[in-house]
Image: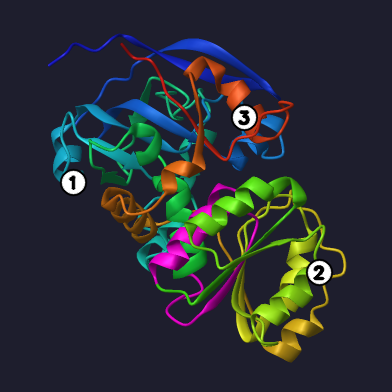
Amino acid sequence: MTSLPSKSLAMVLTDLRKLEAQDLPLPEIGHDDALLRIEACGICGSDYEQFEGVLRTPTPVVPGHEPLGVIAKIGDGAAERWGVDVGDRVAVETMLSCRFCKMCLRGDYHLCTSRRIYSYIPLSDDPGLWGSYAEFMYLAPNSVVHKVDATLPPEIAVMFNPLGAGYRWAVEIPKTGPGDTVVIMGPGQRGLASVLACRDVGAQQIIVTGLEADRDKLALAKEFGADATIDVENENAKDRIRDLTDGRGADIVVDVSSYATTPVAESLDYVAMGGTVVLAGVKGFKSIPDFISDKIVMKEIAIRGAIGVTASGYQSAIRLLEGRTTPIAKMHTHDFHLRDAELAIRTLAREIKGDESIHSCLLPDTD
């Protein structure tokens, strides 16, 4: 077995919009935990929110909550419990739960009353190397990991995270199935992943809305299986959805847009009588103007929040990725070196003029 270094390069968030390269000691591994060598770490909107300070997480901290990697060292107890060993490639769930509270015991471990998120745990909590903006990452005893085909390119395999969100938010929560019409609001990586997930379970009609600036993403949504796309800045989305659904509206509306509050109010107009609205895009804790609750009453709309992904969503995502039957690789637009984490975040946030990413990831160089 190749010997391990004594330290790991990590990009540490030390203040608002400030990432610093630091060498952090590798933790000691006991009976019930493990060490992961990171192959790829996905970048998403919440990375920007943490970087910008909208998510007020403790600092200094190692961000990164979409880790894909290879088990570098593992205790016997963890190996038996997780069914993995040194050399296995795994996807790591971002949330750590207690496993014993009421929410955990009823199966909603992602709503654990004492849940922690890897990338929000500060360096002051031993062993410190929690997030995946790093060459190596500590895996706590209460981690949940999933084996992944080692022959998939890492930049594709790491899409287990957004694709898992597509399955949980757009399929599992609203119970999407054959015959359903789904409106997906926002054509980012999780919106596009929702298209793939809905198409996989046989949704009859998929409609995706976005902005004029999203034209390339809307075109990609069509390639992924959307039946129609709507530019809400240049088209009347309410009228288009009415026409596309013969006046009935959508059975399911999924909002995965970030920060924009208008889609939340508009979702009540797009959904059919007795339909379901899933709210998954965070808005920075802003209030929703023109939100008319009587529409919920008159149409008996069910509104569900969606936070995080659970094992079933990740398993569906990994199955689809390993099946190699979709054009999901077209969603991956950028690879960044670990040291370029700030550039990766700013590119996703459209802060880099003339460059825009859909899905991107950090690829550490551990040689």
Q: Helix or strand or loop: what does disc 1 sit on?
A: helix
- Compared with 326, 229 (above or below) is below
Q: Where is mark 3, residue-wise?
A: 345
Looking at the picture, how far across and down is residue 25, in whole percent?
A: 38, 13
* Quarter-of-image position of residue 70: top left
72 lies left or right of 301: left
| Of labels 2 and 3, the one closer to you | 2
Looking at the picture, how far across and down is residue 214, in whole percent?
A: 69, 48
| CA–CA distance in space, label 2 to label 3 | 32 Å
Which residue range is magenta in the image? 173-201
Residue 13: numbered disc? none
Residue at the (65%, 29%) spot, across then down:
347
| CA–CA distance in space, label 3 to label 1 | 35 Å
| Of labels 1 and 2, the one closer to you | 2
Does the segment drawn in magenta span residue 55?
A: no
Residue 236: numbered disc? 2
Q: Amino acid at mark 2?
A: Asn
- Res 112 visible: no
Query: Nearest the camera: 206 or 76?
Result: 206
Q: Helix or strand or loop: what does disc 3 sit on?
A: helix
| CA–CA distance in space, label 1 to label 2 | 53 Å
In the rendered structure, which disc, 3 or 1, sits on the residue that comes first in sequence? 1
Residue at the (68%, 35%) spot, across then down:
349
- Res 313 visible: yes
58 lies left or right of 16: left
In the rendered structure, which disc, 1 or 2, sits on the residue that comes first in sequence? 1
> Looking at the image, do the residues carrying marks 1 and 2 touch, with CB atoms under 8 Å apart?
no
- Crowding near the residue tagged with mark 1, few <14, some 14–19, many ≥20 C-alpha atoms within 10 Å: few
Q: Amino acid at mark 1?
A: Arg
Q: Where is mark 1, residue-wise?
A: 81
177 lies left or right of 89: right
- Compared with 316, 213 (above or below) is above
